[in-house]
Amino acid sequence: MININRFLKNSILLLLSFNCIVVAAQQTTTYDNFDASSLTATNKKFGWNFNPIEYDPEILYSCVNAVANYARQIYKNADSLTPNESLTNAAEIQASFMAKEEERTHENVVSALKTPQLRGVSVGATKRVNELITRVKATKGIEDYSYLDVATETILSLLKNKKTESTILDKQ
């Protein structure tokens, strides 16, 4: 005869264990095996040498977007990001400020442009914006990096940061 209390207790413990394993599996994405090298098949320029002193910003922009969209597709099956001129203009405002100040920051000293939301509104976009700021270090020689290498390291730095991971992979 089956002891019903023992059966229920063991069933509940098994379900709780399974739930813990599932939650742990969802929270431990390390992105160590992220490989976007297949993107050079669709755009040969991504494989070109990247020289930080003299580079083509259009190729870099396109490559970073392609790598971000690839990550969004394989990790969340999310739609591709699409360029938005207003948001690009808002980002350029802050990028120019950071380059001038030689500092990574979300805040600008100009009060009308102080936050990402204010910068978005100033260029005609919505105030529901988020800004991702990152940098990557190049430890090899200049000739050892392609546009894809730089873009992959940029996106990986955002994916591995728990504060920015959800923004880059958000399905909205």
Image (spheres, grey):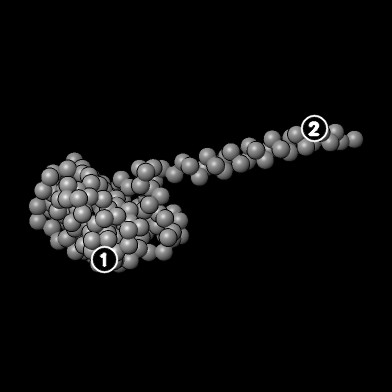
Q: In this rendering, is residue 40 above or below 167?
A: below
Which residue is found at the position 17% from the left and 43% from the top? 103
Q: Position of residue 111 (x, y in %)?
A: 20, 50
Where is mark 2, residue-wise? 6
Residue 170 occupies quadrant: bottom left
Instruction: Using residue 172 as the reference point, say whether residue 88 is left or right of it.
Output: left
- Please identify the quadrant where the N terminus is shown: top right
Q: 43 and 10: which one is in front?
A: 10
Q: Quadrant of residue 129?
A: bottom left
Q: Percent from the top left, x then y, of residue 83?
A: 29, 66
Q: Residue at x 22, y 50 (%)?
A: 114
Q: CA distance from mark 2 to mark 1?
A: 64 Å
**Number of residues whose C-alpha sits closer than 10 Å to that of mark 2, classed few (under 14), some (14–19) or many (20 or more):** few
The answer to whether residue 63 is visible is: no
Residue at figure coordinates x 32%, y 53% from the top left? 130
Where does the image place residue 13, in percent across and percent down from the top left? Answer: 69, 35
Q: Which amino acid type corresponds to the residue marked 2 in the rendered image?
A: Arg
Farthest right residue?
1
| Label 1 secondary element | loop
Q: Is residue 2 above or below residue 147?
A: above
Look at discs 2 and 1 and give the one toward the viewer.
Answer: 1
Q: Which residue is mark 1?
A: 124
Q: Answer with left or right where residue 15 lies relative to residue 97.
A: right
